[in-house]
Image (spheres, rainbow, N blue to C red):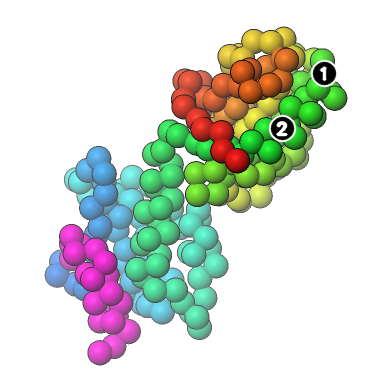
Amino acid sequence: MNLIENQYEKIIEFYPNVILENNIISHVKIPLKKDYFLEINYSRYPKKPIVGLIRSDNRAYRKIDKIIPLLNSWEKRNPPSIVDLISEIITFINDLESEHIKIKKDLLNGFFALCRNQHPKEILFLLRITNGIATETILPPGTQTYKHSGSFSPSRLSLDLSLKGSIHSHPSGNPYPSLVDINRVFKTKQFNFIIAFPYNLSSIKCFNSRGEEIEFTIID
C-alpha cells in the first residue's frame, strides 16, 4: 500500500461519508453543515495538499490554507496525516460557528481590578480563546484608549487564530456597544465582552461581531 492509499484508508475509517472527486482517492470532499464541503487534493502527498471550502454547486467559498496551523507549518519530511488535518479544519470551522463562550473567573477578577485602577479611563484587550474558553488577555499593538472610547490596529496583529475575542471597559456604566465599538473592535472578533462600571459580575455583557448579545458562562 503506497502513501496515498494509506491516507485514504484512514480517511474513510474516520469519515465514512467522504466523497471522491472524479473517483480519485487523492481528491476528496467531506460534507459539512449548511451545504458546504471541505475539499482536499492530496495527490502530491507528502507535499502540502490543496485545501478549500466549497459550496454544494462546487463554487469556491473560502481558501483556508493561511489560517490553519497544520497547513502553515507543513513539512514534507514530516507531514501530518490527512485525517489530522481534516480534524483540525473541522474544529476550526465549528469554533467559528459557535456563539457560546466560557471565561475564567480569575481572568475577570484581574480585569475588574485593572478597570478600577484605570477608571475613568477606558481599557481594551484582546482575548485568547482555547477550546471555547477565554483564558488570557493580550494588549494589542496600536491600542488607543480614551475616557469614552478605545481602538486598536488589526493590521498590526500577527496571525494568531486563538485571539478570537476582545474585552474592554465602559466607565460610563452603559454595558452596550457603541457604533465605534462595533465598527472598530467587534467586526474582527467573534466574542466581545464589555465590562461596565462598577466592574463586577453583574456588569458584564458579551456580543458577537455584529453587536448582538450572546450567552457566556463564567467558570472557575
Q: Quadrant of the C terminus?
A: top right
Q: 133 left or right of 122?
A: left
C-beta proximity under 8 Å, tags 2 and 1: no
Instruction: Give the vertical position of 49 relative to 52 (above or below).
Output: below
Instruction: Give the vertical position of 151 relative to 177 (above or below).
Output: below
Q: Which residues are magenta?
A: 1-20
Tell me what residue is drawn at x 67 percent, y 33 percent: 108
Residue 21 can be seen in this image: no
Q: Is residue 81 part of the magenta span, yes or no?
A: no
Q: Residue 119 shows which numbered tag?
A: 1
Q: Residue 109 shows which numbered tag?
A: 2
Instruction: Give the vertical position of 206 relative to 72 (above or below).
Output: above
- Toward the viewer: 91 or 100? 100
Q: Earlier in the sequence, mark 2 or mark 1?
A: 2
Tell me what residue is drawn at x 19 percent, y 72 percent: 24
Residue most toward the right?
117
Q: 71 left or right of 42?
A: right
Q: Amino acid at mark 2?
A: Asn
Q: Residue 197 sits in which quadrant?
A: top right
Q: Residue 118 sits in which quadrant?
A: top right
Residue most toward the front?
220
Q: Main secondary structure of the magenta part?
A: helix
Give x and y (percent) for residue 100.
45, 34
Q: 158 left or right of 15?
A: right
Q: 25 left or right of 162?
A: left
